[in-house]
Amino acid sequence: MKFGKVGQVVLVTAIALVVATLFTACGTLTVGFLYVATTKQTPGQMEVYEVNSESGALRTIPTSPFPSGGRNPLAEAADAASQNLYVANEDDNNIVQFGIGTDGKLYPQSTVNTPGTYPVALAINSAGTFLYVVDILQPVGGCSLANPCPGDIAVYPINSDGSLGTAVGNNSTYPNYWPLLLTSSNTTTVLTPTGLNVLANGNDVYVTATNPATHAGYLFAFSTSSSGALTELNNGAPLSVGADPVAMASDTQSQYLYLVDEVNDQVESFSVQSSGLPTPVGTAAAGGQPSSLALFNNQYLYVANSLDSTVDAYSLSSGSMSKIGTYTSSTNPVAITVDPRNLGFLYTVNFLGSSLSGYKIDQSNGTLINTQASPYASTAQPTAISGVPHGGSAK
């Protein structure tokens, strides 16, 4: 059967409409975008994945990956408005601001250097007014990995265009950062910062650190001010928290704080007092070398175990943790997050597996099942993950 020219035009038009409809439908299924830092390339790269709202399956966007703006990107944070992504490149001591397009693409906007060297963690307050960064080494003369010194925390105001202002001055001795010291007068003990958390209410900031010589862990607590300046809580004395705390998470009500200890293979929970000081609630066993953790709806806690290549699930009640189960991931998960719209999908980035693992959370009991086509291939050596919802801030 042959088609005349008019028939051919009608057929082509119909096919085009069907294709357009399919693409539109696919577009509406994108619930958000995940940004994954990878370190194998020099400079580092940022991979971008679309999250399917029905299956949780991931797909890289066509223009991914993007240069991270430096070497060895290890930390990232997106603002609450889903307009800017900030990436810390450890080996270049910088923070790169990227504008986020409506299609998930990244556009480099500005770069600032951190006060010290080797930034390892970033966090933004929920108001989107300040960005916090911790460096392994504070800016003192002669300080290096061969001749280490304590780490530091610095605070950057976020301007209306997303760029970072000058680091907030705390006092005349340390004008652009706070040193992480055992006491306000102790400048000799080397403490290496490992993790960073800002409460959802923005009132308090926490930093975990470890003493490499003694394998003693510490938790620093700071209150914040409208100017961004930090005030040390507990008279500047950090809390003792195990051997090597490496990551933290807090609930949306700013009532509980959780951290993982990779040497003691456990999770520790704390109740946040009105003063901002955390009070221990309890501990729970984790797998081998827990590396990161994520909360879902303040009901469930998920911990990625980098040595075991597993994810532990816990139910939560007033800060207490009860193990639900353990689930397999790809090799060496080092970061974990919930989907940007909080629909109930969970993802790990697996450094040695060069992949991402995806899970669907059963919201009735917290158990996990693999998402469609999981694991998802990465270019290699992913280290960090964050996400933004498609179409703006999460509701």
Image: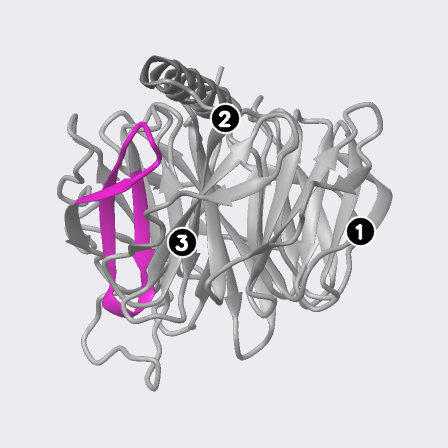
Check if residue 98 falls in the magenta segment.
yes
Residue that badge 3 annotates: 75
Q: Measuring 21% from the left and 33% from the top, which residue is drawn there?
A: 158
Q: Quadrant of residue 85?
A: top left
Q: Position of residue 293 (x, y in %)?
A: 62, 47
Q: Which amino acid type corresponds to the residue marked 1 in the rendered image?
A: Tyr
147 left or right of 191 in image: left
Q: Main secondary structure of the magenta part?
A: strand
Quarter where residue 369 is shown: top right
Name the kind of residue labelled 3 in the image: Ala
Of pointers 2 and 1, the one earlier in the residue sequence: 2
- The residue under label 2 is 26
Question: For this rendering, which residue is in front, 383 or 287?
Answer: 383
Alpha carbon separation for disc pair 2 and 1: 30 Å
Q: Residues within 10 Å of mark 2 (few under 14, many from 20)?
A: few
Query: Mark 2 or mark 1, which is nearer to you?
Result: 2
The mark closer to the camera, 3 or 1, is 1
